[in-house]
Image (cartoon, helix red, strand yellow):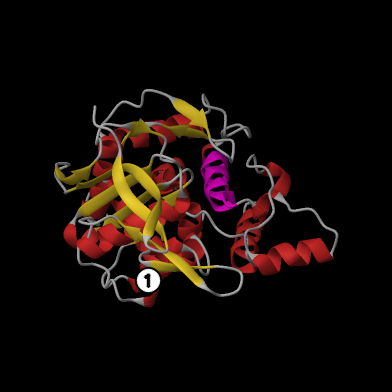
Amino acid sequence: MTDPVEMTEVLRGPLVECVHRGHAVICDATGDVVEAWGDPDAVVYPRSSAKMIQALPLVESGAAKARGLTSEQLALACASHSGAAIHTDRVNAWLSDLGLADADFRCGAHMPRDEPARDALIRAYAQPCQVHNNCSGKHAGFLTLTQHMGWGPDYVEPDHPMQRACLEAFEDVTAETSPCFGIDGCSAPNFATSIRGMARAMAWFAAAQEDGGARQKAAVQLWQAMVKHPELVAGENRACTELMRACKEPVALKTGAEGYFIAIIPGRKLGVALKCADGGTRAAECTITAILTRLGVLDAAHPAARRFMNAPIVNCRGIETGTIRPVAGLF
């Protein structure tokens, strides 16, 4: 067992005021570790970083094709969106095409992250719907497969065929038996695996071939949809969206709650997974930016990279008080 290592530090003036520790792994197409920091075998929940795995049954089953799903809908199936109109309008249209309504979701409602959408609800004295949930695209995918297969409506139950299909895909691409699951914020099971296992899965996505089996074809469709529609995977000013746009070559990125982040790099057949031990999103965003720079797929001087790595911290009067940066040697 290896302790988490320092990955991101926060300075105020000349002093390091805060240090974020964690684990990170880069795997190649064979599943071997190329580089690692901390403990590659640390077992954690990947949270929303696993959404493209959860979407595999939707595509490989033929349900996506049978329902005529577009690349936009596949991107939303992998998304933790901001609840902006570009997200909720598309998910609502998807539900309508299925002949379903907001009440058929099992994800619950929360206020949208998107400020215009949030402010519009407040001005209208309205409550958010389940479609505003950042996972509603994933749940629309769950509903599509559930309807296609004729399964029961409570698709988030751990013993439901929908979730059993997700677990089978998860264990296949991570090449590990998941030791447990926890219930995610959207009420679906989230299966645990090692950092190495998740990096191995992302490398599998990166190396998947369009002329491979049904699962490989599904993987290619999903990462391509994410790269094609970065604004649907997260939203404006979000790390996933901004960094995908900034990379020099196709890279699919996905954040997860509590400091998780993954990268799929098809041109190099590499997969990355990282976890900040304290759950800090700012540290996960800084660290993934540093690793992308280290691998040469992102220019450190790009404005998007500068937003998340070596970024100035500014106080309420606009005075620069410090910076957030990767620790020495990370990139």
**Residue under label 1:** 306
Q: Which residues are magenta?
A: 134-148
Q: Nearer the viewer, residue 200 or 320?
A: 320
Q: Nearer the viewer, residue 112 or 1?
A: 1
Q: Nearer the viewer, residue 299 or 79?
A: 299
Q: Main secondary structure of the magenta part?
A: helix
Residue 59 in the image: state x and y as whole percent: 41, 49
For the image shown, how many numbered marks are present on the structure? 1
Residue 173 in the image: state x and y as whole percent: 28, 39
Q: Is residue 282 above or below residue 108?
A: below
On the picture, is 182 further left or further right than 34? right
What kind of residue is marked 1?
Answer: Arg
Residue 45 in the image: state x and y as whole percent: 42, 35
The quarter holding residue 14 reads: bottom left
Residue 289 in the image: state x and y as whole percent: 33, 61
Callout 1: helix, strand or loop?
helix
On the picture, is 219 further left or further right than 186? left
Instruction: Say which residue appears at 30% left-offset and 32% top-offset.
Output: 42
Circle 1 crowding by C-alpha within 10 Å: few under 14, some 14–19, many from 20? some
